[in-house]
Amino acid sequence: LGFYWLRSDAIRKSLFGSFYDEETTKKVYEELIKRAKEHKDAVLDATFLKKWQRKLVVDNFPDEYYFVLIKADENIIKQRLQTRKDISDADFNVYLMQKASFEPPDEIPPDRLISVENNGKEDISLILKKLVDKIYMR
């Protein structure tokens, strides 16, 4: 689709290895924003669990952002995390901790928040097409 893919996990590992704490998280999100500014169209692949993390995007790209909130059944999440083989270290226990600390994106205007139900039955390419259609139809 022509978007540059910036992954917080890849940035964290390249800068800090497997180390992870609040200060590391802050630096990773700042680096994510810095790198996003270098590209016209980018996907910032990160959890954005906290309002301060989303505020970084809103403040730096006031009219050029969309947040995608993907929801899935917890059994599907658990299965995917158990079978996933990529750069992320997150497992189901990490998911549960993140779920407990999640701050709902109620500060994001509805026209900038795209919510997707991913129940595991629909092909990911169809989900992506829906997302792109929503973004470009606005």
Image: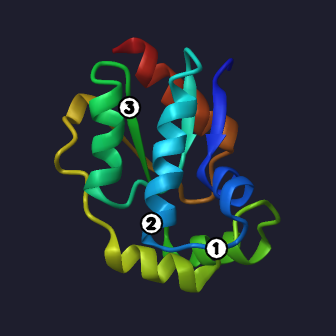
Residue 65 location in percent, x, y?
Answer: 38, 27
Q: Position of residue 108 (x, y in %)?
A: 22, 41
What is the three-letter code of the residue carrying label 3?
Answer: Tyr
Local packing at callout 2 (Cα closer than 10 Å; few below 14, some 14-19, many 20+) is few
Task: Name the residue carrying label 2.
Answer: 23
In three-dimensional space, the C-alpha distance between marks 2 and 3, rounded to whole angstroms, equals 25 Å
Q: Quadrant of the C terminus?
A: top left
* Residue at figure coordinates x 50%, y 31% from the top left: 131
Residue at figure coordinates x 50%, y 23% from the top left: 37
- Element type at marker 3? loop
For disc 1, the neighbor class at 10 Å (few under 14, some 14 to 19, many from 20) is: few
- Give the label on residue 138, or none: none
Quarter containing the N terminus? top right
* 2 vs 3, front mark: 2
> What residue did someone put label 3 on?
66
Which label's residue is closer to the chain start, 1 or 3? 1
- Label 1: state its secondary structure: loop
Q: Specify whether 36 is left or right of 114.
A: right
- Camera-nearest residue between 129 and 48: 48
From where the camera sits, is residue 130 visible? no
Colour mode? Answer: rainbow
Snapshot quadrant of residue 135: top left
Question: Label 2 vs label 1: CA separation?
Answer: 10 Å
Q: CA distance from mark 1 to mark 3?
A: 29 Å
Q: Which residue is mark 1?
A: 19
Residue 14 falls left or right of residue 22:
right
Instruction: Give the mark count.
Output: 3
